[in-house]
Amino acid sequence: MNLSGSKIWSQFNRIIAFMLIIVAAYLLVPRFLSYTNIVNLVRQTFLLTLISYGMGLSMLVAGLDLSIGSVAALSSCLAATFIARENVLLGILVGLGVGGVCGLVNGMLIAKFKLPDFVMTFSMMFIARGLAMTYMQGESIYGYPKSFIWVGKSFLGPIPTPVIISALLMAVLYFFLNRTTFGRALYAVGVSKEAARFSGLSVSKKLIQIYSLSGLLAGFAGLVYIARMNSAEAEMGVLWPLEAIAVCVIGGISFSGGEGNLLGLFLGGIMMAIINNSINLLGIPARFQDFFVGFVIILAVAIDHYSKRREAGG
Amino acid sequence: MKRSISIICVTVLMLLSFSGLSFGQKAAKDMQVVMIVKDLVNPAFIEMKWGGFAATKEHGMQYTCLAPEKYSVDNQIRIMEDLVQKKVDAIVLIPIDGKGIVSGIERANKGGVPVFICNTRAEGGETLGFAGIDHRIMGKTLGEYVGAKLKGKGQIVILEGTTGASTAIERLEGVREALKKHPDIKILASTTAKYNRQLGMKVMEDLLIRFPKIDAVIGINDAMGLGAKEAVKDAKRMQEMFIVGMDAMPEALDAVRSGELMATVDANNFWQGFVSTDLTCKYLLSKQMPAKETKIGSGIPEVITKENLERFINFKAERYKKYGLKPI
Amino acid sequence: MKEKLGLKITGPLMICIAVILFFSIFAENFLSASNAVNIIRQACVLALVAFGQTFVILIQGFDLSVGAVMGLTSCITALLMVKGMALPLVAVILAVMVATFCGFINGFITNYMGLNPFISTFGMWGMALGIALVITEERVIFGFPDTLRVFHDGEFLGIPLPLIIVIIIWGILQFFLKSTPYGIATYAIGGNPVAAELSGIPVRFQKTMIYTFSGLMAGLAGIMFLARSNAAQAVDTIGYEFDSIVAVVVGGTSLLGGKGGVTQTLIGVLLIASVRNGLNIMGVNSYLQLVFVGIILILAYLAESQTSTLSGNPIQNLWKKLFGTGADKG
């Protein structure tokens, strides 16, 4: 049971780091704190968290969903076919449906056939990507009706709509994770599958639910993305699994399950957004970018790890 | 005695037919030409694929087009090796990298399969010839267009292609070469968006923050240009600058029509594929070696703007119709 | 004796045989001697990397850096040779030493600093790739002496050299894993790390050594890759990290650690290489090939887990799994 006070405390280090980074960035590039850039950062943060919710959930149960980007690609390419023909509602249903089905397949094979999450979602990644590419044959589907594009492009006041959508989703997930038995069961399964089983929880049912949800969330994120890009192509989302894992790990969600919360995920999203933003604002040349990102991620995780060890070791 | 002779005759005949000996030239319809492109996602290569299809159709030969699923020259080599096993009659190759592909060409040479190079030069091995439009010339043509459009003065940003990809490097060199002639044009930033649309949009968003005034955006391919366009549109700064891309993707052409993109560059991809395959087929039929290098059309890529857009589209449609294909 | 040689008829082996049969019917010249040699040459690079990955997976870890480390190795070798700074052999040794060192760093960060292998090896991936891009200035390195190509194209008594190299290394590793205390300790560490620690095995040290070994194999694979393509480019080998993990898993080594081995990996490598080769010959779109690889990965894993843990009719087991009552599932 997490009191909200202790949750903020558990993210204390991250909050400090986040503030330090902002100060450093401002000193290096004054434009960093300009109005447009802040809107930029907010948008990038919420887009990053949007693709990470599914990964975060699966990591909470000691699992991993590597298929999110490919499933998003497949579902949104299929959805786009309908949306571009003015069947927006049908398209949305297809997008969510395909995502959910892929997630369901993941969950069933992981829960019932005991396939390791890595293997199953990895295969699904190949399968979904291959199907998407074969279906699209190199073309892109573009030109959506205004009723759909507003999802990606409009603003509600000063805030971009995708941000609001992602934030709403985060709120809903927060509710489920912290105020329902579903959420508590999730953490229980993540901490120890055996213990959860002994206390009567149906572990396989939880797993199926989580992976289906992850697939659904991937489909959802895909729809938001194509609304923003105004175009759907088979190669989208290639980097999503990596970005999502980075966001979750920096945010303190552990691979071994049962540890971490949405606040951490959000902070992870902010930090990744800042890192990516700095790369471009500072004009870091391409050849150094991968190095830079890899290095920063290790640094972030190492710091977090050491501070935890210090807390525990006393 | 008679029985043994007939058995021997039948056996010999069977052996001969199994060994595939043919007395005389193989018929055209039994010849198989395979084109290997860099990927089947980029419309440029899909146009080359159809070019090859049209050419083999004219000669009545069998045709397949393959591409690696990973942008890696090693995978192309792998496909070539496998095709040599299959004993195809010829390969039309668009190498992902001209130097890395050499060992693949040598293996095809060893296996007796002739190779024709299209679009990206290969730096070794025995080949039938080369036909294509240089990526450097593409970059240079676009650079010259931008220079002229800016009347020699202005600030621009460049969105580069995948780090290390030879086409990205060559196109960029061409652009820079052309821009060097205009010392008053300042390149504010030249950074990679990995040929990716989403990344093009994200990078452009950040560049818009960094630079309060940009006069032009050069996307080394259309995908990045289109991604950048979305970012500029969202930031409501379309009036401030113009955006150009390369590849003449259908979506880019639409953007040129609507004015969102100022121009794109067409490399006559269909014709590149057609000419290369056509020369290869002719070689297979008549053993006539093609020229070492064959120009495609005028050899200069065409900058497509609103002015010549319709004419260009019609010309493409006519050509596709001629070979019985639906225009892309 | 049979166990020592790892001759069990496993699920993946059955799938491998089925696949070969399938392609021998539907793909022209698949079963010919020259195609067999072709497949072997294509698979040798993957085999070397996968051997290293096998060890890491056996101890419940994985190494995501191998693709980039391979690339770094080939780029360093190529650069040294092209600038005439070193004899090919010296260049190879230096480059492989760098690769081994990368593996050591992986092991150190993972085991002595306590970071998750996913993070540490991913970070190494970024760093190795970055360094390779910087030293090559993002260009392709070529035009160096042909000496190394013999490792890929050469033959000894009619047998392709890469096959000999792979078989020798396989033999050494198999013996090591099954018959030496260190090898058996590897299984112990992966199967039950706590018990291993308690029985006096220097777990952290051994794990670090295993990551170092993975770096070494990545280095060798990078050299073999260079021998194959005769040109070096930093980004060319990206992807091998996943391919190697797939090969290991398809072969039957468990991701949970403690089960599997290099023989299984060899089967996995053979399976994947055959599938890719067969599909290429059949002219199947490369993107569709991805779908098949994904499906085969699932099937191979299922086959392995079903044949090794369950008894009884496989069809019956399948039914029970899909529609079994909640009581015995949990």
Image (spheres, coloured by chain):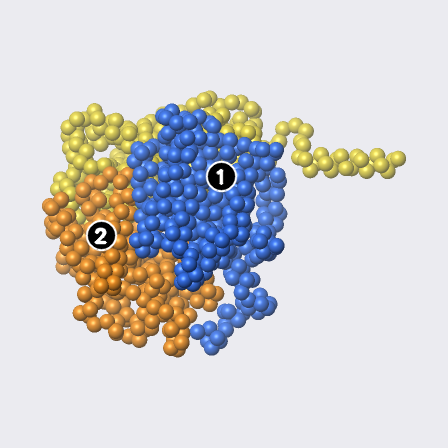
Chain colours: A orange, B yellow, C blue
The disc placed on residue C286 is none
Tell me, yes or no, whether the two marked residues, 2 and 1, touch with CB atoms within 8 Å: no
Residue furthest to the right in view is B1
Q: Position of residue B268 (x, y in %)?
A: 37, 33
Q: Position of residue C166 (x, y in %)?
A: 52, 42
The residue depicted at 36 percent of the width and 28 percent of the height is B134
Q: Where B136 falls versus C209 (above or below)?
A: above
Query: Which residue in the structure is indicated by mark 2?
Result: A273
Q: Quadrant of the N terminus of chain B?
A: top right
Kind of element beneath mark 2: helix
Left or right: residue A265 versus residue C289 is left
In x, y percent, where is residue C124?
A: 33, 46
Q: Is residue C161 above or below residue A242?
A: above
Circle on res. B78? 1
Q: Nearer the viewer, residue B7 or C105?
A: C105
Q: CA distance from mark 2 to mark 1?
A: 39 Å
Q: Position of residue B188 (x, y in %)?
A: 17, 36
Query: In the rendered structure, the residue with mark 1 lies on which chain?
Result: B
Q: Which residue is more in the foreground, C167 or B192?
A: C167
| Residue type indicated by callout 2 | Ala
Q: What is the three-letter code of the residue carrying label 1?
A: Arg
Residue A173 picture quarter: bottom left
Which one is in front, A282 or B82?
Answer: A282
Dividing the picture into quadrants, the one containing residue B14 is: top right
Q: Residue at x 52, y 43 (%)?
A: C169
- Residue A172 horizontal side relative to residue C56, left or right: left
Q: Is residue C301 visible?
A: yes
Residue sitting at x 40%, y 56%: C203
Judging from the image, mark 2 belongs to the subunit labelled A
Task: Establish whether labels 2 and 1 are both on one chain.
Answer: no
The reply, left or right, for residue A18 in relation to residue B307 is left
